[in-house]
Structure formats: C-alpha cells, structure tokens
Amino acid sequence: MRSFTSLMLRFIVWGAGLTTMLIIIFLVGYIFINGIPHITPSLFEWEYNTTNVSLMPALINTLLMIGFSLALAAPLGIFAAIWLAEYAKRGNRFVAAVRLAAETLTGVPSIVYGLFGMLLFGVFFGWGYSLLSGVCTLSIMILPLIMRTTEEALLTVPDSYREGSFALGAGKLRTVFTIILPAAAPGILAGIILAIGRIAGETAALIFTAGTVARVAESAMSSTRTLAVHMYLLASEGLYTNQAYATAAILLGVVLCINGLSGFVAKRFSNR
C-alpha cells in the first residue's frame, strides 16, 4: 500500500512538472512563432509614427524604468530585510506586522498601485504623467517582493556562518556584509529577477502614472510608454496585431536575456 501511494505521488509530481514545462514551452513558442516573422527594421527606427509603429522608444524606456526602479527599491528592500533578519528581535510584534504588511502588499492588484501613484505622485506632488511617477510607483510595487525574498534568503544562511565569524572576532556589521550577504546572494538575485519581470510586464500601473507617449523620455518629467504598454495599445487598436506580436517577442527576449544574465551572476556567487 505504501509503495502504491509513493508511486502515485511520484506520478502526480512528475505530471505536474511536465505539464508546467509544456505550458511554458507552448506560450514561449506561440509568442516567438507569431512574433519573429513580423520583426522588421522599421520597428527599430528611432522615431515612432503610424507608419512604422516603432518599438525602439518603448524599449529604451523599459530599460530606463527597470534601472531606475531597481536603483530605488533594491537598496531599500535589501537593507530592510537585513534589519528584519539580523538586527530585529525574533518574535517581535512589530517585525511580525511588517512581514504581514509586506506579504499583503505583494498581492495587491497593480491597478490599485496605479491609482495610488496617480493620486500621490501625479496629482498631490504635481508630477503628472511622467517617467518619475512611473518609477516611484513601480518601486513601491516591487519593494515588498525584494524585501521578502531577501529576508528568506538571509534566513536560509546557517547560523554556523555567523557563529564562526563572531568567533574570529568580526563584528555584526562586518559579518553581515562579508559573510551573510555573499552566501545569500543567489536568493537575493532571484528576488531581483522576479522584480525585473514584474516591471517589464507592467501595464495598468504605468498607464495611470507614466502615460502612453511613444517617445524616449527626455527628462524625468516626460511622459513615456514601456514595451508592455506599447504592446497593449497596439493590440487594443486592432490595426497593428502583427506588430503587437513582434513587440511581445522582443519583450520576452529582453526579459529572458536579463534573467539569464542575472542567473549567471547568481551562479558565479554560488560557486565562490
């Protein structure tokens, strides 16, 4: 009976893994098959117009959005996680409240973040539809994700690492930055990869904050559109379906390249 149960559980696990892999392969293949044939040089012209519907401005804006959002959210999330995991007293009610708030914010729909960002940054601060409004909104959106994944990565580091460092005379701060953080680097980078994917694929929050202007942002106060917003607008108009598929293929390729590079860096840290 036990062997039969074990066999069934193994079959379910393998079936679930295979099904997930097939779904991913189907989605990626469908996007590439429908998008790559429609990738033309006109899509990469510097200026967007109704003739070429160029994605180049949106591509540059996407990279800017990713870079600036991570520059704001990653340090805050990592240092907050260090405080929660290394300095805050275990069992503290305030720490439990912070963790509960972070987990709750992770599940908030993106359109809620978009409305919040529009009211706070666009209306209250007077930034309007701008790159800065979008960056700040996305930073708030990914902050709980980076904080929670970083905290979990820090908690997985064995206490023997800390005890060995303290035994050799290292202080708390030195132990955290020279021993704990390098050991937790793969997990931290995994959280950053997830954050990059959420930034690159975000539409609702950015339509309300960054806007939909199809040109490269000239300043932090310029209205812009990212690749995801660009793809959504092309598909919703119904006139540029092929170009929308091509944009989806480019967006997927960019995300895969960034994830691959981040995974390579994480592997190097693991090997060290």
Image: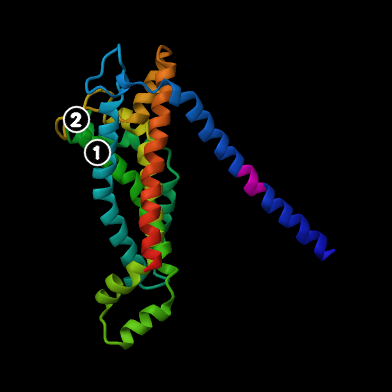
Give the number of the disc on residue 64: 1
Q: Which residues are magenta?
A: 16-20
Locate residue 250, reporting x and y percent: 38, 31
The residue lying toward the viewer, choosing from 61 and 109, is 61
Locate residue 87, reporting x and y percent: 32, 72
Identified by mark 2, the residue type is Ala
Locate residue 152, reporting x and y percent: 43, 62
Q: Quick check: 258 left or right of 61?
A: right
Identified by mark 1, the residue type is Leu
Q: Secondary structure at mark 2?
A: loop
- Residue picked out by circle 2: 217
Q: Quick check: 215 left or right of 82?
A: left
Give the number of the disc on residue 36: none
Q: Is residue 152 above or below residue 15?
A: below
Q: Main secondary structure of the magenta part?
A: helix
Q: Secondary structure at mark 1?
A: helix
Q: Is residue 207 above or below residue 69?
A: above
